[in-house]
């Protein structure tokens, strides 16, 4: 085959890649250097003005980023712990194993926006069933009106929705583990706890890192839950980076500035996730 | 002469007879207008039935159901039956109506022939909308002059009048006018229980009637239902609370900005006082009230959960519907005022009673300039607002269609749908008095309106959530408004703002 023919075969893929990945990124960068807003639509060139504004005069963006980091790390950590525990449970020979495997996957199969609307009803402070039940004990927590509890509510919804995904990956990992190390541990008389710490957990480290990173990437884009459950409130106490960018771009119509925030956020996430992968690899795979 | 009179009388009888015949026919076919039947006019059911739009597809972007979304869909269905056109209706949350139209507008596209939004979008949208053809303007005899002006810019009408909105006070008459409650309130507080005329009185009464079952229905009731959810029109609720303290008739030249200098006035002591009151209000709204959007407010007050409410007509009309638990137990009054008002000229409070109506305006709708179906679109809008539809729509609270025609300001219109005469009278008088006031405030209609209002919503939401003090919150809003002025251009904003200031200063 002629060497040049290879490129001809690669061309369709390359065109798709340019169309759906490269062009939007380049356009976002170009948009970020413009002052496009409702009054002045168009790709004028204002240099780095938007970036200077973002880095020197917009604490709200950075607050939303740190809030997002807190929410993402907390939810993914909890999803990992619970997902791993559930996977470990149905990995063993227990009754109704198949039933539980399907049951634990259900939340992931539901539509996030619909489920968040249901959760919002659940958390409703005067009409919701949760406070109705808790009122028996004389408490009615302001689930969505208190800045602290609103974050807790978001964490609950995210953990409920996405632990299934973690469960699925961890179960797949457990099912693919070799049997020999477990047989050797059994011969050595290792307790179940020691088997988990010294055999299961180290063997699961590579898939754990993969699962955590996939979920962190997804969790860092958290938007629908915040939008439906709290609209970033009360105040700005649950506003995340994606929600901030949405408000700037599609509510206030500061398209240029929203592109700046979006591109900056992309760069920060690439750097952060690269560091997190390295740290996780070092910590979990030190053996 | 006698013969001429006789012929004329006969002709009149025949004409009226033919109209009644139409009314019966169309009222039977379309239950929505059963009460009135068809009302003759350029866009009546009869007139529309003579059009043939078969093979034409009209696309509409409107609000989510029910507010404005439900009447849009209902009239679309009726329009389809009458004209043969196909009407595709898309429902969009309030916060996204602006961008859903603006994105394609700015890209030079028209995915929707008709776009619904709010009347304060006019400055940003007008360059993308088709002016309303003169023949349609000419038949708007019943539309009040102020609403024709609201729908127009520089004398050209861009928004088809379908709704008119004001903010006013709604209260539970069965409590406020109840002698037993008045005596109890007097005994417990030493004060008179009456329709509040200041926000301080409003707060005192709302606090008193908060968290106990004062109507004996077995449920807890609360003081006030208000739109406090960020990005859900909360900025309008804040302006309603601010006008009493910050709109001073003796200092003309701007409520939001000083028109001369374009200095934002949003953090002056008048606005800060209003925000301080509002932060107190968090203590007398229902549980979760800090997250109430407009729909929640309507349902809360309309469902009998609170003593007061003060936004659009919808909550009042919803409360007055026959299926409401508080039908004919509510009253309307002007927004509360204040015992002092900020004077920005001398930098001091003027110790005088001040009350200012806030004309928040309302739903607006336009036809895309690049639409290929302008003829169908304007006919649809004309049909939407025809006499029969309008009369049926304004009586249904959840529809969000509120008075804007001269006829609507007559008590008879409301007593005919079951309102008690005194309530209907107080309602139309409240609306009419707002029209007469010389101390009115109109909403911002300037380039970047959304940025200004969004910044205000963010700041006030932070204060309500306890993240910032009222002064800190409004200082933050002030700084943001200055940045927006820099970006959009103070002169551009001034040019547009001057129109609103002239209306506020009674020069238009």
Image (spheres, coloured by chain):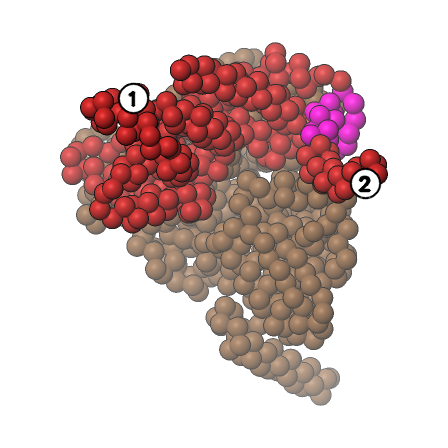
Chain colours: A red, B brown
Q: Is residue B112 left or right of residue A268?
A: right
Query: In this figure, which residue is indicated by the disc labeled 2?
Result: A1
- Chain letter for mark 2, please: A
What secondary structure is found at the residue carrying circle 1? helix
Task: Indicate the position of residue B312 as horizontal and vertical percent values.
Answer: 48, 44
Quadrant in which residue B226 is drawn: top left
In the rendered view, tell whether residue B361 sits above or below residue A188.
Answer: below
Q: Give yes or no for residue B66 being in the magenta stretch.
A: no
Please state the extent of the stretch shown in magenta in the rendering: A25-46
| Residue in the foreground of this view, choosing between A82 and A159 | A82
- The answer to whether residue B124 is seen in the rendering is no
- The answer to whether residue A250 is seen in the rendering is yes
Q: Is residue B315 left or right of residue B7?
A: left
Q: Give yes or no for residue A37 being in the magenta stretch.
A: yes
Task: Indicate the position of residue B477 as horizontal and vertical percent values.
Answer: 55, 20
Tell me what residue is drawn at x 30 percent, y 54 percent.
B325
Q: CA distance from mark 2 to mark 1?
A: 54 Å
| Residue in the foreground of this view, choosing between B283 and A78 | A78
In the rendered view, tell whether residue B81 sits above or below residue A167.
Answer: below
Query: In this figure, which residue is indicated by the disc labeled 1?
Result: A197
Tell me what residue is drawn at x 49 percent, y 53 percent.
B65
| Residue in the foreground of this view, choosing between A46 and A13 | A13
How busy is the neighbourhood of tag 1: few (under 14 within 10 Å), some, or many (20 plus)?
few
Q: Is residue B227 left or right of residue B60?
A: left
Q: Nearer the viewer, mark 2 or mark 1?
A: 2
Tell me what residue is drawn at x 43 percent, y 53 percent.
B317
Tell me what residue is drawn at x 50 percent, y 68 percent.
B32
Which residue appears farthest toward the left when viewing the image?
A: A137
């Amino acid at each position: 085959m002629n060497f040049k023919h290879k490129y001809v075969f690669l061309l369709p893929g390359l065109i798709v890649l340019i169309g759906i990945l490269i062009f939007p990124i380049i356009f976002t960068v170009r948009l970020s250097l413009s002052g496009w807003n409702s009054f002045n639509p168009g790709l004028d060139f204002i240099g780095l003005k938007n970036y200077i504004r973002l880095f020197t005069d917009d604490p709200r963006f950075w607050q939303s980023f740190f809030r997002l980091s807190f929410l993402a790390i907390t939810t993914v950590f909890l999803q990992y712990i619970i997902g791993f525990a559930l996977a470990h449970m149905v990995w063993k020979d227990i009754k109704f194993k198949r039933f539980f495997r399907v049951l634990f996957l259900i939340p992931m199969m539901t539509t996030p926006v619909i489920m968040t609307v249901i959760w919002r009803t659940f958390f409703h402070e005067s009409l919701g069933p949760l406070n109705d039940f808790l009122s028996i004990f004389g408490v009615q927590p302001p689930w969505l009106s208190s800045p602290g509890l609103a974050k807790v509510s978001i964490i609950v919804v995210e953990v409920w929705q996405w632990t299934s995904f973690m469960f699925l990956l961890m179960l797949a990992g457990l099912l693919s583990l070799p049997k020999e190390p477990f047989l050797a541990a059994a011969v050595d008389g290792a307790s179940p706890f020691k088997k988990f710490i010294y055999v299961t957990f180290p063997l699961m480290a590579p898939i754990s890192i993969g699962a955590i990173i996939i979920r962190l990437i997804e969790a860092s884009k958290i938007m629908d839950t915040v939008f439906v459950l709290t609209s970033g409130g009360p105040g700005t106490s649950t506003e995340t980076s994606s929600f901030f960018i949405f408000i700037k771009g599609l509510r206030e119509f500061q398209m240029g500035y929203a592109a700046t925030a979006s591109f900056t956020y992309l760069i920060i996430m690439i750097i952060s996730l690269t560091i997190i992968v390295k740290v996780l690899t070092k910590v979990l795979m030190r053996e | 002469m006698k013969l001429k009179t006789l012929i004329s009388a006969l002709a009149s009888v025949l004409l009226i007879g033919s109209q009644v015949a139409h009314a019966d026919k169309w009222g039977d076919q379309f239950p929505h207008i059963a009460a009135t039947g068809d009302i003759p006019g350029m866009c009546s059911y009869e007139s529309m039935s003579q059009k043939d739009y078969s093979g034409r597809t009209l696309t509409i972007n409107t609000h989510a159901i029910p507010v404005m979304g439900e009447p849009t869909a209902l009239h679309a269905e009726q329009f389809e039956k009458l004209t043969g056109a196909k009407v595709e209706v898309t429902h969009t949350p309030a916060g996204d109506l602006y961008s859903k139209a603006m994105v394609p507008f700015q890209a030079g596209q028209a995915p929707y022939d008709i776009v619904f939004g709010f009347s304060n979008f006019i400055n940003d949208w007008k360059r993308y909308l088709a002016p309303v053809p003169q023949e349609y303007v000419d038949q708007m005899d019943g539309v009040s002059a102020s609403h024709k002006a609201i729908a127009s810019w520089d004398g050209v009408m861009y928004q088809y009048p379908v709704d008119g909105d004001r903010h006013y006070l709604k209260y539970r008459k069965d409590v406020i006018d109840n002698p037993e409650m008045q005596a109890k309130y007097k005994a417990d507080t030493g004060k008179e229980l009456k329709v509040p005329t200041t926000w301080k009185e409003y707060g005192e009464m709302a606090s008193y009637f908060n968290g106990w079952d004062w109507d004996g229905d077995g449920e807890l009731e609360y003081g006030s239902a208000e739109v406090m959810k960020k990005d859900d029109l909360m900025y309008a609720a804040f302006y309603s609370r601010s006008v009493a303290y910050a709109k001073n008739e003796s200092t003309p030249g701007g409520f939001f900005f000083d028109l001369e200098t374009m200095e934002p006035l949003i953090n002056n002591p008048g606005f800060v006082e209003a925000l301080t009151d509002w932060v107190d209000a968090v203590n007398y709204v229902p549980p979760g009230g800090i997250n109430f959007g407009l729909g929640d407010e309507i349902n809360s007050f309309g469902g009998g959960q609170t003593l007061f409410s003060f936004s659009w007509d919808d909550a009042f009309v919803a409360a007055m519907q026959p299926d409401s638990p508080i039908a004919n137990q509510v009253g309307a009054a002007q927004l509360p005022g204040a015992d002092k008002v900020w004077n920005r000229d001398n930098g001091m409070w003027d110790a005088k009673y001040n009350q200012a109506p806030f004309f928040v305006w309302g739903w607006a709708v336009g036809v895309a300039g690049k639409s290929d179906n302008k003829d169908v679109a304007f006919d649809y809008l004309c049909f939407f607002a025809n006499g029969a539809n309008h009369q049926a729509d304004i009586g249904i609270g959840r529809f969000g269609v509120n008075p804007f025609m001269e006829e609507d300001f007559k008590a008879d219109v409301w007593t005919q749908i079951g309102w008690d005469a005194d309530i209907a009278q107080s309602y139309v008088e409240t609306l009419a008095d707002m029209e007469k006031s010389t101390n009115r405030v109109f909403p911002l209609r300037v380039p970047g309106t959304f940025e200004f209002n969004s910044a205000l919503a963010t700041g006030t939401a932070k204060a309500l959530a306890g993240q910032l003090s009222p002064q800190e919150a409004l200082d933050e809003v002030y700084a943001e408004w200055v940045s927006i002025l820099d970006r959009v251009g103070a002169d551009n904003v001034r040019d547009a703002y001057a129109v609103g200031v002239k209306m506020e200063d009674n020069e238009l």
